Amino acid sequence: MSASVIELQGVRTRFRDQLIHDGVDLVVPAGEIVALVGGSGSGKTTLMRHIIGLTRPEAGSIRLFGEALHAGQLAERMARRRRFGVLFQHGALFSAFNVGENIAFPLREQGVASEEEIAALVRLKLSMVEMEPTHAALMPAELSGGMVKRAALARALALEPELLLLDEPTAGLDPDRSAAFIELIRTLHRQLHLTVILITHDLDTLAALASRVAILADKRIVSHDTLERTLALDHPFVQRFFHGQRRRAVMSADGEG
Amino acid sequence: MAPRIAAASIRAAGARLELAGDWSLNSLGQDIGGIRRTLAQASASTEWDLGAIVRLDSFGAILIWRAWGERWPAKVSLQQQHRRIIERAATIPADALPRTAPFGPRAAVVALGDALLGFVDHALHFIALLGQLFLDCIHLLRNPRQFPLAEVSAGVYKVGVKAMPVAAMVGFLIGVVLSYLSSLQLKTFGADIFIINILGLGIIRELGPVLVSVLVAGRSGSAMTAQLGVMRVTEEIDALAAMGVSRSQRLVLPKVFALMLAMPLLVLWTSAVALLGGAVSAWVELGLAPSFFLETLPRVVPIANLYIGLLKGAVFGLLIALVACHFGLRVQPNTESLSASTTASVVSAITIVILADAAFAIATRTVGVVA
Ligand SMILES: Nc1ncnc2c1ncn2[C@@H]1O[C@H](COP(=O)(O)OP(=O)(O)OP(=O)(O)O)[C@@H](O)[C@H]1O
Ligand SMILES: [Mg+2]
């Protein structure tokens, strides 16, 4: 399958008189894990909100699964939305529901699975993100920061969608959990032929998962390539982002040795 | 994706069940009933062919696993990757999710007790809030420069000035209606002149303050509760506390002062407009000239009634602000609690104001009424 899941063309975004994106082009083929990288405030989250149709860019076109994002009847648009899962940067769990109900919510909305099957699925999703079944009864306000992330990930995975958009999934996780998360995404990717858009600042996650790296800088995608070729790129942001962090990592390794 | 995968299908061929296509939640949903029925026909000797399944997700795996009676059937053929997905579904811990206990007689007793204790808890918290307010006032008397003047003045503008149009409209209409209905009755007795006594006493002493309280509780009390509640949800109150800023001094006190200042002014304004409405109606209905109305009013309604009305306004303002802050500060960090608290705040504020009004009526029964 080589068809593209996401196609962005000439996307331009402006908040009042501040230009955020100016001609963003990005094509994500099916089955890829694309890491979207950019400085803080460069507009990664905003771009993700465009992709899932929460906001509309000032100019440019967005195609999802080969169809224009806002095309079709309400039912078609809703069906399209069920084909992707989103992990928001701050979790966005429903605060009035406990963790189990949060994960069960998209499943219930489908109206396909029985209550018993939903309970089994919820247990499965919880174990996928390494949470205990007893955590299902906790309210979002009672969770730690990392648990919020994992519960939100479990909810994003509830429908096991074809496209997964993850906004900083490993921020706030300990290294052990980050590694487990990487393993989980890799497994899901293999088993379900997922396409994943991964917004991250974490080099480990990026190096372990990304089949391609898209760099958002200067209001555009300046590069969309494999990690090796991205590393060789001569762009100030790339130099600072990758080589700055790498140097630090090397230095700390020296310190231990 | 261009090559759309065929939807989930299941076909019985003798003792064989052939599963094919997209066995994921979205696709299975198209004919889940039929698929469940066919799966239910399977027996221990059924031969399973899963080789043609293109996509399998956890839901599909659970469906199949349950159809198998939660163990691997004797005869089954499937792709290696799908085997792993079903194996994963098979490892779902059997212990159920924690369940909420069903509602029974015991739960009813517990709920009743909870409600009672909750009421006591509310009362204690309310008293503590009042005490804290008192302490804050003493603190401010010692350090007058810390008085939150800007917040109070902004509050007076928000709850007072901005409420003037709606208060005037409601007051005017009530005045007109009250005057019209009373004058119809008075006319039959030939006691037209008493319309001034009735309107003057009724509006200045009773109706004005209560009417304004109901308006302000609905308009500003709910807003205060919601504001404090959202600050609780977004941890802004915790951030304030971490900076060493007293939440009662910065959040509660300005609201209380603003309402205590704005309410008497609003009462004055609303009563005046209501009397105007009453005078207009009396003029039309009974032919009482407005100038005569104005002249007679101070003679038949002692000035003490106005003082009582204004005092009531200040006290009701205090109560509404305290109730609003009380419920706002007790919001749990979730949206359900926010909406429940806002409702409770408005309902409690109005109820408490009416209770206080009754107390006022008893306490001032000898003041300002010509026997
Ligand atoms: N609703 C909004 N109104 C005005 N400006 C906004 C809005 N949302 C985002 N912005 C601005 O757009 C820019 C990009 O924001 P965005 O949240 O997309 O950044 P980001 O790349 O996700 O950063 P981070 O890595 O810190 O999450 C920022 O400068 C932000 O101030
Ligand atoms: Mg962001």
Image (cartoon, coloured by chain):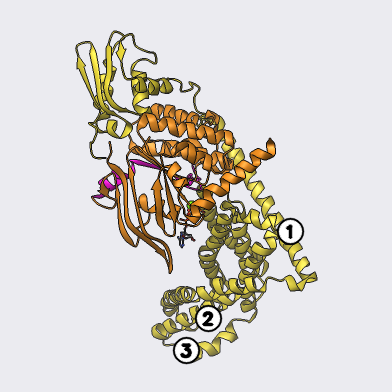
Chain colours: A orange, B yellow
Asked whether, in this view, residue B264 is left or right of residue B13, the answer is right
Assess mark 1: CB under 8 A from ligand 1? no
Q: Is residue A38 visible?
A: yes
Q: Secondary structure at mark 1?
A: helix
- Most extreme residue toward the bottom, as rendered? B291
CA neighbours of label 1 inside 10 A, class few (<14), some (14 to 19), many (20+): few
Q: Which mark is residue B131?
A: 1
Residues shaded magenta? A73-97
In this rendering, the label closer to the viewer, 2 or 1: 1
In the rendered image, which quarter is residue A134 located in?
top right
Q: Is residue A76 magenta?
A: yes
Which residue is drawn at the image coordinates 49% and 91% (left, top)? B291
| Spatial separation of the CA atoms under disc 1 and disc 3 | 48 Å
Q: Chain of mark 1?
A: B
Q: Position of residue B14 (x, y in %)?
A: 19, 11
What residue would you read off at disc 3? B290
Q: Quadrant of the C terminus of chain A?
A: top right
Mark closest to the chain's N terminus, 1 or 3: 1
Q: Is residue B325 magenta?
A: no
Q: Chain of mark 2?
A: B
